[in-house]
């Protein structure tokens, strides 16, 4: 009985309970100092809104992050040897959710993996101690769509390119009885089921893309027509009215797809600590998969990125949508996996082979607003991602060759964070620093990080 209950707790943690819905890490120090906002004069902004590709550079910049965190990691690495008494799997999980690209100025104490088991006559409880802090009060959802670096070639306002993308999404639900024994160390009771359910999907593909971004409308301020007759003026500060649009259809070549729907649990008998094993286990899972070179082969589909940005009296309003109507057709293999408690074994039953199935890549929408007053910029950004909506607010002011920045943002866990920073410019080169709070560790407590960037103007 004790072994089964402890095993259930461990399985719960390993199926994803230890990895929170971590907000994305921002390593551009200028952007981080401004609360993570996105505007058209940031070097990587075209990834969020394809229309930004057509906007003149103006006072834009290109940021080269300086990975100060690698120095910190080298000086104090976690223990990777599982046989070492200092090994802590949750330190490895923290490293995954926080790639060592920024410098940690403060962080919560590492979660301990100690477990205490209390046994009395016909009574049993499990105290996960530090691990109780990472048991969620509701469903645990994590994942998202990641566009990895690829290769692209531009021709004026057009471009062609190829890049890989990965979509991973998972939702883990604990039944109330199981959550109570894990989170609150409630005692186990007789004739009670302690269960959980998990739904997950993962797919990877290459996107072959051709895009075009251009200025669709332009009305300069009266008296400045000659200054902008070439069309290369900066609409962010000229006061002109201009509309830029862009679209990039893509062909998707699916490399692999897999999804899982599972239910499992342990049901106690009439006694907790009888002479036999009064616990019955049940697990049922339905899987679906396809892979290039294997079952079902590769997948094929289409999608698009679209965007637009309007400038009016130094006000910028942009809307970008990535992976719009993106779908991939597969030939999947479906199987049912059931655990037989009486036989103590899993049985796998094929349901379908080469069944037609269409997967979807969720849309990510970015809305940004910016207003520029001489040397001051105020900006706001809303990013509607598959599992969360984040809000970013920021400001920047230049005083000669020195910049001062401040911001705040609501992360994927609905917690508000604060940021600040500054920079110094030396001609075409500058150095930017930013300090920000975040809650990306597996225990959702606030920490502070510092980012640094070399900036090319």
Image: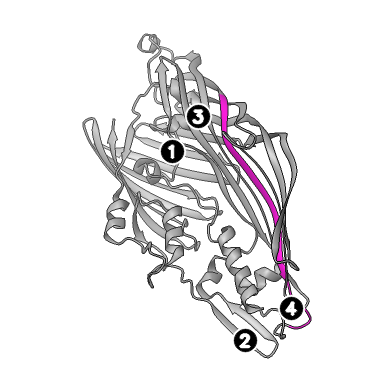
Q: Earlier in the sequence, mark 3 or mark 1?
A: 3
Q: Nearer the viewer, mark 2 or mark 3?
A: 2
205 to 72, vertically: above or below: above
Q: Which residues are magenta?
A: 251-271
Between residues 438 and 374, which one lies in front from this camera angle?
Answer: 438
Count of number-bearing discs: 4
223 part of magenta stretch: no
Give x and y (percent) for residue 184: 62, 75
Which dot marks residue 278?
Answer: 4
Examine the residues drawn in magenta and state their main secondary structure: strand
Residue 54 found in image quarter: top left
Which dot marks residue 49?
Answer: 3
Q: Which residue is mark 1?
A: 378
259 part of magenta stretch: yes
Q: Are marks 4 and 3 in contact (CB under 8 Å)?
A: no
Q: Nearer the viewer, mark 1 or mark 4?
A: 4
Q: Earlier in the sequence, mark 4 or mark 2?
A: 2
Residue at the spot 49% in from the left edge and 39% down from the top edge? 380
Q: Nearer the viewer, mark 3 or mark 1?
A: 3
- The alpha-carbon separation of the residues under discs 2 and 1 comes to 60 Å
- The alpha-carbon separation of the residues under discs 3 and 1 comes to 19 Å
Q: Are marks 3 and 1 in contact (CB under 8 Å)?
A: no
Pointer 4 local density, CA inside 10 Å: few below 14, some 14–19, many at least 20:
some
Q: Which residue is mark 2?
A: 119
Q: Nearer the viewer, mark 2 or mark 1?
A: 2
Q: Earlier in the sequence, mark 1 or mark 4?
A: 4
Give x and y (percent) for residue 410: 52, 50
């Amino acid at each position: 009985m004790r072994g089964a209950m402890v095993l259930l707790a461990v399985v719960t943690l390993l199926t994803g309970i230890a990895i929170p819905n971590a907000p994305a890490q921002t390593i551009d120090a200028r952007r981080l100092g401004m609360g993570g906002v996105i505007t058209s004069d940031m070097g990587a902004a075209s990834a969020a809104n394809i229309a930004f590709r057509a906007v003149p550079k103006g006072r834009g910049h290109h940021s080269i992050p300086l990975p100060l965190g690698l120095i910190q990691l080298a000086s104090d690495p976690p223990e990777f040897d599982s046989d070492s008494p200092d090994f802590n799997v949750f330190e490895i999980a923290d490293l995954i959710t926080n790639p060592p690209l920024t410098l940690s100025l403060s962080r919560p104490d590492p979660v301990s993996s100690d477990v205490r088991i209390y046994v009395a006559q016909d009574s049993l409880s499990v105290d996960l101690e530090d691990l109780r802090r990472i048991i969620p009060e509701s469903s645990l959802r994590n994942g998202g769509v990641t566009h990895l670096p690829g290769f692209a070639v531009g021709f004026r306002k057009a471009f062609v390119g190829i890049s890989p993308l990965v979509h991973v999404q998972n939702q883990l639900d604990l039944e109330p009885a199981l959550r109570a024994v894990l989170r609150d160390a409630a005692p186990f009771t007789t004739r009670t089921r302690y269960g959980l359910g998990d739904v997950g999907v993962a797919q990877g593909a290459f996107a072959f893309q051709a895009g075009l971004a251009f200025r669709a409308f332009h009305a300069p301020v009266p008296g400045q027509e000659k200054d902008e007759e070439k069309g290369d003026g900066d609409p962010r500060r000229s006061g002109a009215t201009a509309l830029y649009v862009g679209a990039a259809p893509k062909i998707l070549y699916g490399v692999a797809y897999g999804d899982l729907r599972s239910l499992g649990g342990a049901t106690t008998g009439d006694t907790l600590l009888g002479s036999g094993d009064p616990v019955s286990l049940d697990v049922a899972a339905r899987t679906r998969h396809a892979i290039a070179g294997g079952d079902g082969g590769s997948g094929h589909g289409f999608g698009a990125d679209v965007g637009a940005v309007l400038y009016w009296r130094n006000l910028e309003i942009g809307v970008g949508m990535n992976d719009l109507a993106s779908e991939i057709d597969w030939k999947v293999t479906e199987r049912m996996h059931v655990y037989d408690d009486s036989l103590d074994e899993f049985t796998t039953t094929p349901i379908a082979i080469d069944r037609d199935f269409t997967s979807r890549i969720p849309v990510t929408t970015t809305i940004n607003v910016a207003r520029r007053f001489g040397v001051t910029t105020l900006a706001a950004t809303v990013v509607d991602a598959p599992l969360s909506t984040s809000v970013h607010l920021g400001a920047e002011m230049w005083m000669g060759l020195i910049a001062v920045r401040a911001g705040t943002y609501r992360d994927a866990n609905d917690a508000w964070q604060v940021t600040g920073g500054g920079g110094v410019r030396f001609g075409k080169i500058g150095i930017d620093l930013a300090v920000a709070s975040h809650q990306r560790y597996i225990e959702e407590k606030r920490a502070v990080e510092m980012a640094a960037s070399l900036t090319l103007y």
